């Protein structure tokens, strides 16, 4: 079976991890030097390296596999899961210095499940550590925030993002068309994991091809959005996104529009006008009863620029 590039090129040491903040690297090295960690809450965009950093920490702290419990809260998120699965794990005596629960996407836990988790963290704080990751720290209850050291991971800029994907593609002996690569980047930024997976999936016979020409299944709708925006077909893009976007993704669409502001043209005044429209759409998003209609209205205003 072909090895996934995201795993093949996943860094395994602190030196191999790209920190955007030197102070954060110093902090991680200090934890490794001390041989222990506090409860941690890693936050940041999807695919940005939160879980990778957690695994690097556990690897360099030499926490054994038998002392690690990995849970993805997007699938395992009930109060019963916390009370049963996690408690059954942490109440056992650790083989090493401590047991560790790596809880990915903790913002999927309900408030009640988070409250139950807080109780477990308090009860077993002498023998267990918890590393939580989340995309939206505002969805984590204050009681959990107060028991974890926050660690926000900033995204890399789009230029470095593109360079890292291109480096992997070239290392794999793939010939990239720069415009096609740019489409994948714009559709996935800042989710590096998703971009690498999508590019690998659409490499055919050593060439990076557009999704429509690959035998790898349906393309992400954002790929089609990028192509429509590049062709100036904003109305068609509006119809596409409103038919495909899930309710929980709508807020991210505004951020995606801002990250790819150059799709509205090279003229700075036009880009500034687009930013103001996107900003107002994002503000209204929190106030309206139907976010999909608000997104559609925002895209209509952008199409009229």
Image (cartoon, grey):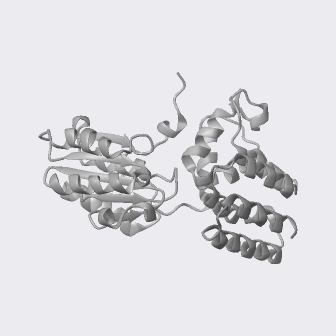
Residue at screen point 81% across, 55% down: 229
Rendered view: 203 above or below 61? above
In front: 163, or 136?
A: 136
In this view, which residue lies farthest toward the top? 1
**Whole-percent x, y for residue 247 in the image:** 62, 53
Q: Is residue 209 visible?
A: no
Quick check: 300 left or right of 118?
A: right
In front: 198, or 72?
A: 72
Residue at screen point 30% across, 65% down: 143
Residue at screen point 33% across, 51% down: 113
Q: Is residue 300 visible?
A: yes
**Whole-percent x, y for residue 234 in the image:** 84, 57
Quick check: 220 left or right of 161?
A: right
In this view, which residue lies farthest toward the front? 289
Quick check: 12 left or right of 94?
A: right
**Whole-percent x, y for residue 1 in the image:** 52, 21
Rendered view: 158 above or below 222? below
**Whole-percent x, y for residue 272 in the image:** 76, 76
Residue at screen point 29% across, 45% down: 82
Quadrant including the C terminus: bottom right
Q: Can you tell which quarter of the image residue 160 is in? A: bottom right
Total numbered labels placed on residues in the image: 0
């Amino acid at each position: 079976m072909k090895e996934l590039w995201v795993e093949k090129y996943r860094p395994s040491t602190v030196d191999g991890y790209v920190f955007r903040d030197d102070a954060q690297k110093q902090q991680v090295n200090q934890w490794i030097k001390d041989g222990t960690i506090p409860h941690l809450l890693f936050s940041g965009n999807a695919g940005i390296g939160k879980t990778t950093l957690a695994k690097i920490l556990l690897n360099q702290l030499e926490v054994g596999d038998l002392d690690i419990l990995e849970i993805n809260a997007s699938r395992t998120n009930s109060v019963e899961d916390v009370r049963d699965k996690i408690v059954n794990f942490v109440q056992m005596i650790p083989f090493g210095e401590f047991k560790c629960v790596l809880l990915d996407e903790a913002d999927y836990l309900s408030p009640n499940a988070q409250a139950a988790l807080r109780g477990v963290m308090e009860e077993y704080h002498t023998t267990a550590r918890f590393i939580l990751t989340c995309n939206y720290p505002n969805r984590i209850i204050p009681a959990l925030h107060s028991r974890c050291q926050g660690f926000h991971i900033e995204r890399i800029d789009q230029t470095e993002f593109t360079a890292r994907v291109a480096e992997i593609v070239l290392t794999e002996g793939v010939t990239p068309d720069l415009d096609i690569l740019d489409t994948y980047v714009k559709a996935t930024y800042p989710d590096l994991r998703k971009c690498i997976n999508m590019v690998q999936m659409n490499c055919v016979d050593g060439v990076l091809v557009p999704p429509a020409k690959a035998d790898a299944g349906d393309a992400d709708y954002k790929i089609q959005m990028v192509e429509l925006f590049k062709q100036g077909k904003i109305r068609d893009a509006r119809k596409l996104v409103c038919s495909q976007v899930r309710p929980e993704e709508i807020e991210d669409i505004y951020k995606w529009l801002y990250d790819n502001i150059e799709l509205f043209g090279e003229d700075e005044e036009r880009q500034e006008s687009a930013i103001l429209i996107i900003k107002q759409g994002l503000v209204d998003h929190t106030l309206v009863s139907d976010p999909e209609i608000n997104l559609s209205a925002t895209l209509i205003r952008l199409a009229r620029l």
